[in-house]
Image: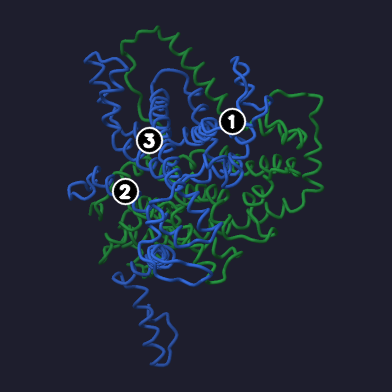
Chain colours: A blue, B green
Amino acid sequence: MDTLQRPAAPSQRSGRAQVRGVLYSQRLAPYFFIAPFVITLLVFWAVPLGRTFVMSTQNVLFGQASFVGAENYERLWGDRIFWQAMFNSARYMVLTLLLLIPIPLVLAAIISSRIGSERVKGFFKASMFVPALTSIVVAGIIFRLMFAETGTGLMNQVLALLGADPVRWLRTDTGGLVALLALAMWRYTGVNILYFLAGMQSIPDEYYEAASIDGAGRVRQFFQITLPNLKPTIVYVTTISIYGGLAMFLESFMLYAGNNSPNNQGLTVVGYLYRRGIEENDLGFASAVGVVLLVVIMAINLTYLTLTGTFRKESVR
Amino acid sequence: MTGPAPLPVTVATAAEATSAGPPGPGRPVRTKHPLPRGLFVAVQTAFLVLLTLIVLVPLVAIFVGTFQDGNEILRNGLTLDIDLQALSLDNYRMLFTDSGLYFRWFLNSVVLTAVQVAGTLLVSSFVAYGFAMYDFKGKNAWFIAVLLLMTVPFEIMMLPLFVLVNDLGLADSYSVIVFPFLAASVTIFFFRQYFLGIPKELLEAGRVDGVTEFGIFFKIVVPIARPAFAAMAILNGMVIWNNFLWPLLVLRSAEKFTLPIGLNTLLTPYGNNYELLIIGSFFSLLPVLVLFLLFQRFFVAGMTAGALKG
């Protein structure tokens, strides 16, 4: 290959040879390849996260930071609205788990069964996925207007069909919660169905054949073969649903057309962080909220990694 | 060589998901069943069709809304109790003649999405190649960092990133929307899975021919990985087109708004512009819907690979 190069001055040649050596080096190449990730991690994640911890021990006002120790955390502990936001986030998380795991699981089982028209099932699967394509802004706008409090709103008309009186949806705690959960179900049922379908497709057919020879019916097969073999997928979906639920913010932000809701009924932990940090510029206090949320989520992460055996060597799959 | 790092189960499920092609051979049919087969199929079909209709109602409602008067919608909400006499094409006329900044926002979204998708694919596949094809010191630790980043919700990062951007005086610029997310952990993870399936002999053949390590990636591996690029282009395109929270914090001037930010400003209690809110929302859905109809299988492959954010 050197013969292809034009002759060059000796100093230039050695410089070029060095560059060429780097380009061909299998030892150095991986560091170049992962460099963009390392830089991103340090600049946009590690440094800001470190700053969150520092700011959470400071009182930050107009760029002036003074160390206050654990004062922000003490304020947080005694803050009624913070606990209300915690409660709202936890309640939303638990309810979405109860709705968005079993229902998609059963629907995925129906789709993956041999019975019924493949065309109907394919169309169903695609339709269920369509809401996941919408932005939270558009989905929020639609649901806000569907849950209008007048008798003419779509959901109140549904109630009227069922013979019930109209509800002032977003003005009441329960009504607002129902709207939030409806929005979550609308957007995520199809996605979770896809996760479960992917998991079900990896279960060998022989298991089902053996079970049916033993005379196990469909329902028993679901409980004795599908569920146990789907455990990794279920654990995974549960885990991402837990942090998705705890970190929920935009659903509420759009539904209530902003970060304020009657009696803070739609306020979540991230919503409170947004209010104190970005709307009220109390960076120290908001950072403390962020740290608490991060600790909770990392604890869940570690539990998940331990449950799935990532820390054990034999878990390499 | 097996997997380089002790991977959590997410890896396994996502890998299975991405490799999942058409459903495998069916399950045995001869199981005992309480219902006659025909009746069971009929019940199942009716059930699925009913659910499909319910799921499509919100989309039908906003489509109908594009023909309704904005003040009416502000007062009464979206409804399917339609007064056919009151429907008109006024909103469409307004959209194409007098919609203010709407098409500016639309264009901003198109350009930003195109640039960010291209950048994300380039940078993330580049990083993923390093993880997939080489053994090097610290590889496991860095890859675990990738996996951990996949699970940190952006909502936690928004405040410190916001402070950083303000300190640097970079607010209201597209660069801060793009740069922090070029090396995207989910996309890196997906590409790594794909590259692991490419035979190493191809790389050796390139080396024998005198191609540089980077030439091997760009000239040999990228062309082979076209399906992976398609899936990630679609997934990232959807996520970036819909991106809301970070641009909401960063963008200040109305002529720089993207579609979601612009539409959000129309959602006011005074509602003097609900016509545009409704028809604008509807039109913002169309590009993604069209892509979905054309490339459904890429959506499914990308989504199940670890779509952690909606």
Q: Nearer the viewer, mark 2 or mark 1?
A: 1
Between B169 and A104, the residue placed more toward the observer is B169
Who comes first in sequence, dot 2 or dot 1?
1
Q: Amino acid at mark 1?
A: Trp
| Host chain of mark 3 | A
Label 3's element? helix
| Host chain of mark 1 | A
Q: Residues within 10 Å of mark 1 (few under 14, many from 20)?
A: many
- Mark 2–mark 1 Cα distance, whole angstroms, equals 35 Å
Q: Amino acid at mark 2?
A: Asn
Between B78 and A316, the residue placed more toward the observer is B78
Q: Is residue A295 above or below residue A159?
A: below
Quadrant of the frame with the N terminus of chain A: bottom left
Place residue A140 in its image quadrant: top right
Q: Amino acid at mark 3?
A: Ala
Callouts 2 and 1 in the same chain: yes
x%, y% of residue B105? 68, 53
Circle on res. A169: 1
- Mark 2–mark 3 Cα distance, whole angstroms, equals 22 Å
x%, y% of residue A307? 24, 42
Q: Is residue A238 above or below residue B154?
A: above
Q: Residues within 10 Å of mark 2 (few under 14, many from 20)?
A: some
| Host chain of mark 2 | A
Residue matched to label 2: A301
Circle on res. A198: 3
Who comes first in sequence, dot 3 or dot 1?
1
